Amino acid sequence: LAPKVAAYNKQLDDALGVPVGPTEVALDSQRASVRGQETNMGNLIADAMREFTKADVGFTQGGGIRGDKIYPAGTVLTRKDILTELPFGNVVVVTEISGADLRAAVENGVSQVADRAGRFPQVSGMSFVYDPAKPAGARVFEIKVGGAPLDNAKTYKVATNDFMLEGGDGYAALGKGKVLVNKSAGTLMATVVMDYVAAQKGVKAKVEGRIKTP
């Protein structure tokens, strides 16, 4: 039995050890970072989701990013690295929600930032400023989507993950719209990120002011 197990493990290592692409930047997936501020790892994942779905916004939560490390610039990321970062098997889904519901989702995302809660958002296609000193539910201002101020009455196409769409981490607002791509039709987040890195021929993601405090 032991030789069979060893052979299987080697097969697995060979499959997971496949290079996806190099990172040109020091890539930060540390727990304290992804649960409390904009990070280039969060931007990479949210960008991949948005690009894959052609949505207005890519929106995921820091608690789903689990590597808890810094990859030095020059590191060649493998499939195993991406699966270590996104281990839960979540899939990318797409929904259409109002600006008001998107605002509520962002408010939820920063509502427990002092506790480094997993709901902290990592975003693409949008930016916002929030004040952690204000009461939860009234912290967010200056939300922009595609560079334009958020319109509460407008409908936005949002790429997120199935856990959040189903109300996980307090994200009830994401479930209030019209689902365009549901869980059964969704693609594994890890696969979406791997394909994006491969298509970009590496990682160039930077922290660029998507999430700010005053």
Image (cartoon, rainbow, N blue to C red):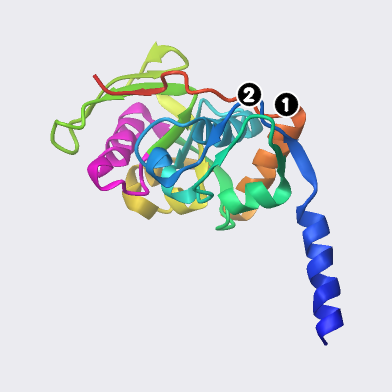
Closer to viewer: mark 2 or mark 1: 2
Any mark on residue 103, and which? none
Foreground of the two, 154 or 11:
11
Q: Identify the image quadrant of the N terminus.
A: bottom right
Instruction: Specify start and end residues of the magenta stretch as a single range.
Output: 97-120
Q: Which residue is pictured at 40% across the width and 46% down the height?
A: 175
Any mark on residue 204, and which? 2
Is residue 105 rendered magenta in the image?
yes
Is residue 52 rendered magenta in the image?
no
Q: Please indicate, yes or no, whether residue 65 appears anywhere in the rendered image.
A: yes
Foreground of the two, 26 or 62:
26
State the SS at label 2: loop
Q: Is residue 15 left or right of residue 130?
A: right
Q: Which residue is pictured at 82% across the width and 72% down the height?
A: 8
Q: What amino acid type should be assigned to the residue bearing mark 2?
A: Lys
Q: Position of residue 75 (x, y in %)?
A: 68, 36
Q: Position of residue 205 (x, y in %)?
A: 58, 25
Q: Quadrant of residue 142?
A: top left
Q: Is residue 178 left or right of residue 88?
A: left
**Which residue in the structure is indicated by mark 1?**
200
Q: Which residue is pictured at 21% across the width and 27% down the height?
A: 131
Foreground of the two, 160 or 77:
77
Q: Position of residue 126 (x, y in %)?
A: 44, 23
Q: Position of residue 39 (x, y in %)?
A: 46, 32
Q: Which residue is pictured at 55% across the width and 58% down the height?
A: 88
Q: Quadrant of residue 102?
A: top left
Q: Identify the image quadrant of the C terminus.
A: top left
Within 10 Å of the Cα at label 1, are there few (<14), some (14-19), or many (20+) other Cα atoms? few
Within 10 Å of the Cα at label 2, are there few (<14), some (14-19), or many (20+) other Cα atoms? some
Measure how far apart labels 2 and 1 are at the Cα level.
8 Å
Question: Do labels 2 and 1 touch, CB within 8 Å?
Answer: yes
